[in-house]
Image (cartoon, rainbow, N blue to C red):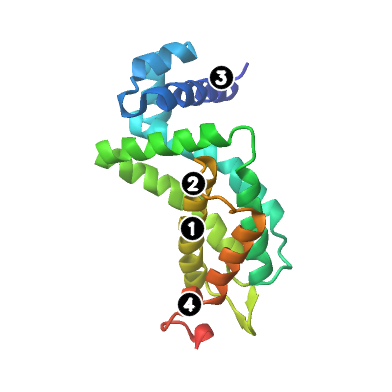
Amino acid sequence: MTRAETKERNRRALLEAAFHVVSRDGYRARLDEIAERAGLTTGAVYSLFGSKGGLVAALVTDYLRPHYEEIEQAIPADMDLLEAVEAFARYYRRSCDAPDALSGLSLQITLLDMALHDRELGSQLAASVRTQESRLVAMFTGRSHHGNTVTSHQAQRLITGLRAVFVGLTQGVLLGLADGADEQYFVDTARALASGTALIDEHSDAAR
């Protein structure tokens, strides 16, 4: 095995161990236990990730990456904005029925708790999420909408709103607090947001 292959193997082992320990213990998760579970030392954590915060931020990126890749596949480039928003909404609602939906929600709540207890870690987590969400902004930028082309700034505003709505609805569905929030409800809510004021941007010529 080459040095690069060994490094990647150790990286994957630490991320998998971190997922289990962090999901269970939250901000109380200990590096020595994560390292032991991975069959490595804490020195490997610092060598590969720099710190506990770096490891957790990498965990978030690793967890989110496949979801964003699936979203990109679910939203073809030739869709206009409202069609893309509808496909995005359908993807989000269907994810509520995935086998790992509850474990994903548990991890989200755990990470939020960690961010609240450690401001530096919170900043690292936010940066990790923003990096992934920039892919969504790029995906929605340039799409046609009522005769105009969606700008990057408009796409950012829209994604912020859609993510807030979808995260809240998803939590409601999984916790049994959103009766009737089926796939069409997600679609109708998302289209209403995209069709309303979310794209009004007084600083953008495209929105005038």
Q: Amino acid at mark 3?
A: Thr
Q: Amino acid at mark 4?
A: Thr
Q: Secondary structure at mark 1?
A: helix
Give the percent coordinates (x, y) of residue 200.
Answer: 47, 80
Q: Secondary structure at mark 4?
A: helix
Looking at the picture, does residue 180 appear above or below residue 140?
above
* Closest to the observer, 81 or 206: 81
Tag 1 and tag 4, C-beta contact below 8 Å: no
Q: Which residue is mark 4?
A: 197
Q: Which residue is mark 1?
A: 165
Kindly report the distance in space between the C-alpha atoms of the residues bearing marks 4 and 3.
51 Å
Give the percent coordinates (x, y) of residue 162.
Answer: 51, 61
Foreground: disc 3 or disc 2: 2
Q: Which mark is residue 177?
A: 2
Give the percent coordinates (x, y) of residue 103.
Answer: 52, 31
Look at the image and tell me in which quarter the N terminus lies.
Answer: top right
**Which residue does the image show at 32% across and 35% down from the upper left?**
114
Residue 45 in the figure: left or right of residue 181: left
For the view shown, which residue lies furthest in the bottom direction?
208
Q: Which residue is mark 3?
A: 6
Classify mark 2: residues with Cα within 10 Å, few (<14), some (14-19) or many (20+): few
* Closest to the observer, 177 or 121: 177
